[in-house]
Image: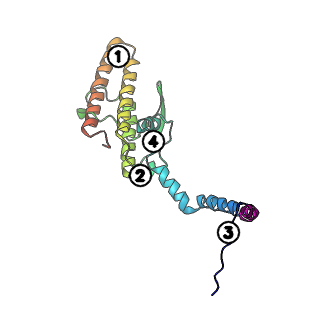
Amino acid sequence: MQIRNKPVLTPQTQAKEAPATRPAAPAARNVVKDSFSSGTAATQRTAAISGAPAGDHGKLMNEYLTGARPPPADFEKVMGYKPYSIQTPHGQRMQDPLGYASVPGQIGPVKEFDKAAKTHDYGYDLLRYFEKKGTPLKPEARKAADALFRKDMFDYANDQKGVMDRFKYRAWAQIYATAVELNSLRQGNGPP
């Protein structure tokens, strides 16, 4: 058996050999490019998209509830309904078509706050959705949903023409918003 010594590469011999080794680089780039179009890589990208994005989950929740961000691609399949959009005097809102103001005994202006409740219900369903996907949203997401619910009810109250109507709806908005926020606090601001 004969052992061959490898030639020692000096800077001069490396320069001579470099053109022969350079064509391998484009092939390597093609391999990387091809791996992104493979089924495995596409599945990994899809899985990453369906999980909760990193970052400010309060901002994320606001984007979902105001329609700035579309619902997750498989939301309808996972949660059983497709959210729809409405335009309010204070901006676009996404709604849960099955949502409603769930007030014990249905006391107070339940019907008047229905739009705010349907948006809030969609927000809570987003919390449940991301929990089911194994990537629960941070507490800031629930706080943001509750804050928008409060804002929407007070916007409705402040839009009333009469002083007594504004006073009445502001009082109810405060009662409902406080009850929701206390319940969220009791549940650790996680998925309901």
Q: Where residue 92 sits in the image (x, y, percent)?
A: 49, 31
* x 46%, y 25%: residue: 90
**Residue to which mark 3 is pinned:** 8
**Callout 4 amino acid:** Pro
Q: Earlier in the sequence, mark 2 or mark 3?
A: 3
How much space separates mark 2 and mark 4, taking CA atoms? 12 Å
Please tell me whether mark 2 sits on a helix, a strand or a loop.
Answer: helix
Instruction: Name the image colouring.
Output: rainbow
Q: Earlier in the sequence, mark 4 or mark 3?
A: 3
The answer to whether one can see residue 112 in this image is no
Residues rendered magenta in the picture: 12-21
**Callout 1 amino acid:** Arg
- Quick check: 174 above or below 33? above
Label 1 environment density (alpha carbons within 10 Å; few <14, some 14–19, many ≥20) = some
Task: Check contact, mark 2 vs mark 1: CB within 8 A.
Answer: no
**Residue to which mark 4 is pinned:** 83
**Residue to which mark 2 is pinned:** 78
Q: Earlier in the sequence, mark 1 or mark 4?
A: 4
Indicate whether residue 13 is drawn in magenta.
yes
Q: Where residue 85 sits in the image (x, y, percent)?
A: 48, 36
Q: Quadrant of the C terminus?
A: top left
Mark closer to the observer (2, 1)? 2
Mark closer to the observer (3, 1)? 3
Q: Point out the residue furthest to the bottom here.
A: 1
- Quick check: 139 above or below 165? below
Label 4 environment density (alpha carbons within 10 Å; few <14, some 14–19, many ≥20) = many
